[in-house]
Amino acid sequence: MSKSETIKVTVWNEFVHEQEHDAVKKIYPDGMHTVIADALNQNDDIVARTATLQEPEHGLTEEVLAQTDVLTWWGHAAHDKVDDEVVARVQKRVLEGMGLICLHSAHFSKIFRRMLGTNCSLKWREVAEKERLWNLEPGHPITQGIGQYIELPNTEMYGERFDIPTPDKLIFVSWFEGGEVFRSGCCWERGHGRIFYFRPGHETYPIFHNAEVIKVITNAVRWAKPRVQITDVCPNSKPLETISPKDVDFGSAGIEQSSDTVG
Amino acid sequence: MSKSETIKVTVWNEFVHEQEHDAVKKIYPDGMHTVIADALNQNDDIVARTATLQEPEHGLTEEVLAQTDVLTWWGHAAHDKVDDEVVARVQKRVLEGMGLICLHSAHFSKIFRRMLGTNCSLKWREVAEKERLWNLEPGHPITQGIGQYIELPNTEMYGERFDIPTPDKLIFVSWFEGGEVFRSGCCWERGHGRIFYFRPGHETYPIFHNAEVIKVITNAVRWAKPRVQITDVCPNSKPLETISPKDVDFGSAGIEQSSDTVG
Amino acid sequence: MSKSETIKVTVWNEFVHEQEHDAVKKIYPDGMHTVIADALNQNDDIVARTATLQEPEHGLTEEVLAQTDVLTWWGHAAHDKVDDEVVARVQKRVLEGMGLICLHSAHFSKIFRRMLGTNCSLKWREVAEKERLWNLEPGHPITQGIGQYIELPNTEMYGERFDIPTPDKLIFVSWFEGGEVFRSGCCWERGHGRIFYFRPGHETYPIFHNAEVIKVITNAVRWAKPRVQITDVCPNSKPLETISPKDVDFGSAGIEQSSDTVG
Amino acid sequence: MSKSETIKVTVWNEFVHEQEHDAVKKIYPDGMHTVIADALNQNDDIVARTATLQEPEHGLTEEVLAQTDVLTWWGHAAHDKVDDEVVARVQKRVLEGMGLICLHSAHFSKIFRRMLGTNCSLKWREVAEKERLWNLEPGHPITQGIGQYIELPNTEMYGERFDIPTPDKLIFVSWFEGGEVFRSGCCWERGHGRIFYFRPGHETYPIFHNAEVIKVITNAVRWAKPRVQITDVCPNSKPLETISPKDVDFGSAGIEQSSDTVG
C-alpha cells in the first residue's frame, strides 16, 4: 500500500484511571491508548499515534488534527476537564470529513454529545458479568472477520434506554448476563464525517487485549477514514436560471447573512 | 377541549430587523413573533405567548420553559447574542420532551446546530424569486390541509447542500425559480422531543402573513407537542438475573460514573 | 367518541394450530383471533372483527378491507396457503393508508415479506424460556402505559439476525434467557400506511392473555390507524412554468407510461 | 487489479423501444444496454455483459446471476412481460448480497417494486425540459468526480411524490424547468445487498451518452458490489446459556417452523 493511502489515526485517552488505580494500572501499565495504538500499528495501512488529556491542548492541536484521518476517544472520569475549544475544533474536523470512534464511557464525553445533540445517558452496573455482542450486519465493513457474536466473559453492563438519535446503521446489540440489552455498535454520518460508537472498553477488565474487540476497532478505522475534506461555508449564490421581473418591491433589509462555519 | 389539553407555545424572535429596518418594520410593525403568536391563538387548542432576545434571559427563564410545550424560534442577525446558558436550558427541555420548531434563518441558530450537531450551512440568494414547496408526505400530520405544493411568489433562496443529519422524515422539498432545490421541511426526534425545521420566513417578504405557511406551523405545533416528560439520568442498576460466580477478580476502580444530565 | 372516529380493526388468523393441537386449543379454544378481538373491543374507540384463512377469500374481500382501518395478522403453519391475490389486495390497501400489525410468526407471512422486500428470517428455539422486552422509546404512542420492560416468563425465542430493512423506529429489543437478543417491536411507513411488527405471540404459551401484550397491540392499533386514504397513480402532468423553446428535436417515442397501481 | 477483484456486471434491458421506434433506434442502434456495458468496460476493474427480455429466462439464468456482482436494470414498456420466477430469482440474489441499480423507468419494474414494497409511482411529462440534479452528498462514493450538480439539457420529467420508502441515503435531488422536484438518486440496503435508483435515462434523449451519467453509474457499480454472500435461513438454535427449570408445562405443538428462504 502506498504511503498516500495510509490511514493516520490519533488514539486519545484521558489517561486518569491508569495513573490513579492499581487495578487499572495492572491491565494497562502505559495506558490503554498505548495498547490500542500498538494494536492498530500492526496493520500496514494504519499509522497510529496517541494523545492524552494531560498534554497541552490535550494533544489535539490544529496541526495534529490536520494530520488525523480518524480519531478514537476514551474518557470517563474527566469529561469536564476537556477544554470546550478543543471540542469545537474536533467537531469542526469531523464535519469536514475526519472519522470519530467513541469507545465505551466516551458515550458521556463532550465530543460525542456535541456531535449527536442528545444526552447519551444509559443504565450501568459493574459486577463483572458476561456480555455477548450480537452481529446484526455481517455484510458491514465493521464486522468483517467477526462471527455471529463476540463474547466477553467480564464486563461492566450498559443498558437501554441509551439516549441517542436513531443510528443510521445498528451494527451490534448486546445481551448481558444480568438481564439487559444495549445498542453496542452504532454508525452515524454527520457533515462529511463518519462516527462509530463501540460499547466495550471498561478500564478494570482487559477489554482492549481482546483480539475481536481490536478487530472491530481496526475495521471501524478503515470504515471511518475520510472520503472527502470539505469545509462548509454559507455562500451567496448567483441564479442559474433567469429570474422573471418582479412586480413588487419589498425593499431589502440589506443584511448579509453570516458565512461562519460551526464553532 | 379541556384546559389540560391546551398546547402552550412560546414564539421566540430575536426581534432585531423589525426595529432596525423600515422594509421589515412595514411588514411586521410589532415584530414577526406577534404575527405568528396571533395566528396560533386563533386555534382553541393552542395558547401562544412571545419571548424576544432583548428580555432578561431572552424571555426563556426556567419558569417560562417549564410552561412551554412547543418553542418556535426565529433568528438571523444576532445568533451569537444568544446566551450559551439559555441554549443549554432549551436543549435540556427538548431532550425531556418539549417540541422545537426552527424557522428559516434559524438554521444557523445556536440551538438548532446544538440539537443536530452539524454546521447547518447552505447556499442563499435574495432576489425575490418564486419558491414552490412540494409536499412529499400527504399523510403526515404536518401537511394536513396542504395540497400538492405551496407556492410563494417572492422568497429568499436557500439551496443545497444543506448540512444536516438525514431527517427522520423529509416533508417538503423546494423548487426555486433560479435553479436550486432545498429540503424545506424536515423532522427529527432527539431525546424525547420532536424538532421541525421549516424553511420559509424571510423578513423582507410577508411570509408569515401567508395562510398556508401558518397552517404548516400550526400543524407542526400539534405534531411536536410533548408526548412524555422524562429527565434522563444515568442510573446504577441492580441485576434482574442471577449473576454467576466469577472465577477472576479484577478489583474495582471504585469510580462512580457521573449521573449528570446534559448541559 | 363519535362513531366516525371509531377505529375498525380486522383481526386475521390462519387458525390452524388451535384446531389441530390440543395444547394450543386449551389456551385458545375459539382461536387466538377471538381473544385478541375481544380484548380490543374492550375499548370504546375500537371495533374489532375477525377473519380467518378458512373463510372465502380468507375473509379479506374488497368489501371487508374497504371497511378496515387496521389489520392485524397472525400466521405460522400455512403461510403458503394464503392466496397471492389476497396478499396483493392487502398490500394495495396498506399503501393507500391502512395500518398493518404483524404478530410473532407473521414475520414469515407473505404480506410482511411483500411489504418489506426482505427475507425476514431469524433464529428460533422453543424451550419455554424467559423473555424481557426492553422499551427503547418511552415517548412513543405504542409504549404508553408500559414501563421499562415487559417480562414474559415462557416464550419461544427469536434471535438476531432478523433480516429486515432498518426500522424507521425501533421500539422494543428483547433479552432471552438462552443468550440471544431480538428487535421485537419495529415501525415502518410504506406508501401512506404504517406497519408495526411485534414479536410475542407463540401459540403454545398464553401470550395474548397477557395484559401488557394486549396493551401494546391496542396502542399499535391507535398509532397505525389511517391518517389519509390515497390511491397513488402515475399521472402525466402539465408544466407549472414556461418551458423554453428547444433547439433540438429528439422526436417522441409516443409511448404512454402505464399508470397502473401496484399489484 | 487482480482478476478476483474484478466486478462482474450484468446490464439488463427490456430492449423494446430501440427495436420499435426510429427516434430511439437513432440514439441507441444496438440498444442502450450495449452503450452502458461498453462504457463500464472502459474500466479495468469492471467486466460488463448484457442481457435482455427476449433471451431465454430474459438472460438471467441461475448461472448468469451466480456470476453477477451487480445487476443494472432498464425497463419501461414491458414490465409485465418479465417472468415472476426471474424476479424472485433476482430478489433472492440481492438479499444474498448482489448489487442492484435501477435506472429511470425501472422505477415501475417488478424487481424494484418487489425490493421496496411500495407502489413507486410518480408524476411524469415529456417536453424535453432541462433537469439539474443537485449533489447532496459530495462525500459519498457515488458522487466522486461529480460537482455541485449535473445538468441535462433535455429530459423527461419525473416529479414528486415518488412513492418509495425513505431512502437510507438521499444522494441527488432534481430541479426541473417545468417546476417540479424529484429524489433522483436514492440508496437502500435490503438483506445483504445494496440498491441504487438513478433517475436519468429516458429513451428518446441521449442520456447514456452523457459522461457524468456514466460516471455516476460506474461509481454506483463500485458502491453496490457485494460485501458478502449469505443465503439466510431460519435455523433452530440451541441455547447459549443454561435455561432454568420451568415449573409449568405448556406442551408442545410439535410444529417445526419452515426454514425456507424467500421466493
Image: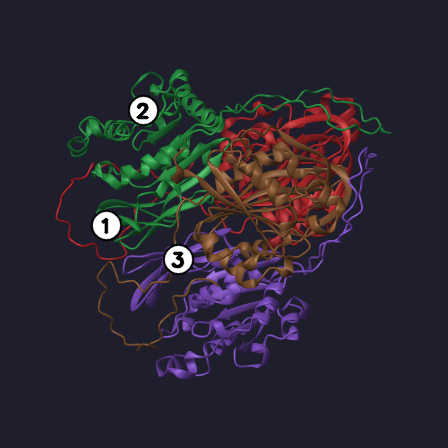
Chain colours: A brown, B purple, C red, D green
Looking at this view, is A69 or A20 the one in front? Answer: A20
The residue that mark 1 highlights is D130
- Chain letter of the residue beneath label 3 in the structure image: A
> At 71% from the left edge and 23% from the top edge, which residue is drawn?
D238
- For mark 3, give the secondary structure: loop
Q: CA gap, disc 1 to disc 2? A: 33 Å
- Identity of the amino acid at label 2? Val
Check if mark 3 and mark 1 are on a common chain. no
Q: CA gap, disc 3 to disc 1? A: 28 Å
Say which label, 1 or 2, has the lower sequence index.
2
- Identity of the amino acid at label 3? Asp
Q: Is residue D112 above or below residue B122?
A: above
- Identity of the amino acid at label 1? Lys
Looking at this view, is A228 or B165 the one in front? Answer: A228
The residue that mark 2 highlights is D47
Q: Is residue C165 something one can see in this rendering?
A: no
Check if mark 1 and mark 2 are on a common chain. yes
Q: Is residue A185 something one can see in this rendering?
A: yes
- For mark 2, give the secondary structure: strand
The residue that mark 3 highlights is A232
